Amino acid sequence: QVQLVESGGGLVQAGGSLKLTCSGSGGISSLSTMGWYRQAPGKQRELVATVTGHTQKHYAEDVKGRFFISRTTNWSAIFLQMNSLKPEDTAVYYCHYRRLDYESWGQGTQVTVSS
């Protein structure tokens, strides 16, 4: 069973940067997709960025050019470098793992961007 632990959230001023880390364990597959989702108060959870393998990356339109996802060589951890943060980026950020019909979620980490 895959377990995911996020870290790196916090409070930052608008225009600042944060880097989130998701450490996975329990049999991470090299063919899996890992990614970041976020959920703001009163809103649905939404996709932020995903990576399949090391090179297939996908970003939500409103984070393109500001957020960058990467993955370790053993596929077990991913990072989200967030630059030029905006107050509307404030949310709980969740790590996600998917391989075929199996998926797992982390517990989430809070990111708060002050104006």
Image: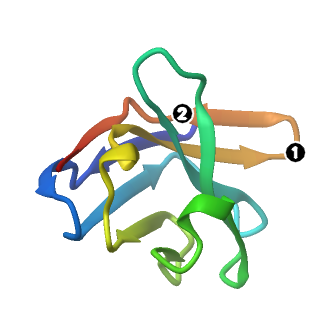
- In-image side of 25 versus 35 (left or right): left
Which is nearer the eye, 102 or 60? 60
Q: Residue visible at 43% across and 29% down?
A: 40
Q: To which residue does mark 1 refer?
A: 100
Report crowding for label 1: few under 14, some 14 to 19, many 20 or more residues within 10 A (C-alpha): few
- In-image side of 10 versus 85 (left or right): left
Is residue 28 visible in the rendered structure shown here? no
Which is nearer the eye, 46 or 27? 46
Mark sitting on residue 105: 2
Q: Nearer the viewer, mark 1 or mark 2?
A: 2
Asked which colour scheme the image uses, the reply is rainbow
Q: Is residue 70 above or below residue 2?
A: below
- In-image side of 102 versus 67 (left or right): right
Q: Residue 89 appears at what percent x and percent y?
A: 39, 48
Q: Residue visible at 33% across and 41% down?
A: 90
Is residue 80 visible in the rendered structure shown here? yes
- In-image side of 23 versus 113 (left or right): right
Q: Residue 52 appears at what percent x and percent y?
A: 73, 69
Report crowding for label 2: few under 14, some 14 to 19, many 20 or more residues within 10 A (C-alpha): some
Q: CA distance from mark 1 to mark 2?
A: 15 Å
Amino acid type, residue under disc 2 in the picture: Trp
Q: Residue visible at 58% across and 44% down?
A: 96
In which quadrant of the rendered view does residue 93 lie?
A: top left
Residue lying at the far top of the rendered structure? 42
Q: Residue 69 appears at what percent x and percent y?
A: 52, 72
